[in-house]
Amino acid sequence: MRTDDPRLAEAHEKMLARVASYNERMLTVLKGHLAFEDFLNGLLKKARRRIRGRTFNGKVDVAQKLLIRELDQKFWYLVEAGNDLRNAVAHGDKHGTIGERIDDLRRALIAANTPEQKKYIEGMTENQMISSAFNQCGSEVVAATEKLSSGGQK
């Protein structure tokens, strides 16, 4: 194909759009995961648990053992689905695998919410849903941390 072939310019534009979409997804997942981990660190510090040297999964394990009532099984399923997506994106898994992890995250987000919210979650774009899932996890951990700070019961 010659460099002045219009098909080449069209293919180039499609490639740029795909790269931009991939970059936006990667940024949404990694920023959301990092923010959630920061909030999780805050919870563990407030509960006087060691975080240095712990992996993300190690921190989750310690946080689960705090037995905070509001952080229920649906919450931890959502956290796990978000972490699985983060790992797939960060480790460059195949496009199909990342798509499966996104579907898993959407199912976990729906399960962690009310039936009335299901239609709104289903209508979200991929990046809106990913951001919403990590934001919800972070908000729940911040609320649990504040409850610990105020001397509230677990």
Image: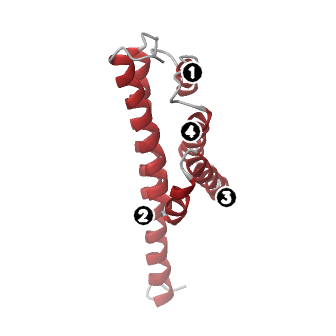
- Whole-angstrom CA distance, mark 4 to mark 3, is 17 Å
> Residue 129 location in percent, x, y?
48, 55
Pointers 1 and 4 in contact (C-beta within 8 Å): no
Residue shown at 52% from the left, 21% from the top: 63
**Which numbered disc, 1 or 4, marks the residue that appears first in the sequence?**
1
Q: Amino acid at mark 4?
A: Asn
The three-letter code of the residue at mark 2 reads Ala
| Label 2 to label 1: alpha-carbon separation | 33 Å
Residues at circles 4 and 2 in contact by the CB criterion of under 8 Å: no
Colour convention of the picture: secondary structure
| Label 4 sits on residue | 83
- Which residue lies under the disc numbered 2? 20
Residue at image x 43%, y 77%? 13
Distance CA(mark 1)–CA(mark 4): 12 Å
Residue 42 seen anywhere in this rendered image of the structure: no
Ranked by sequence position, the earlier of labels 4 and 3 is: 4
Q: In the rendered structure, are the residues bearing label 2 and label 3 in contact, judged by CB atoms less than 8 Å apart? A: no
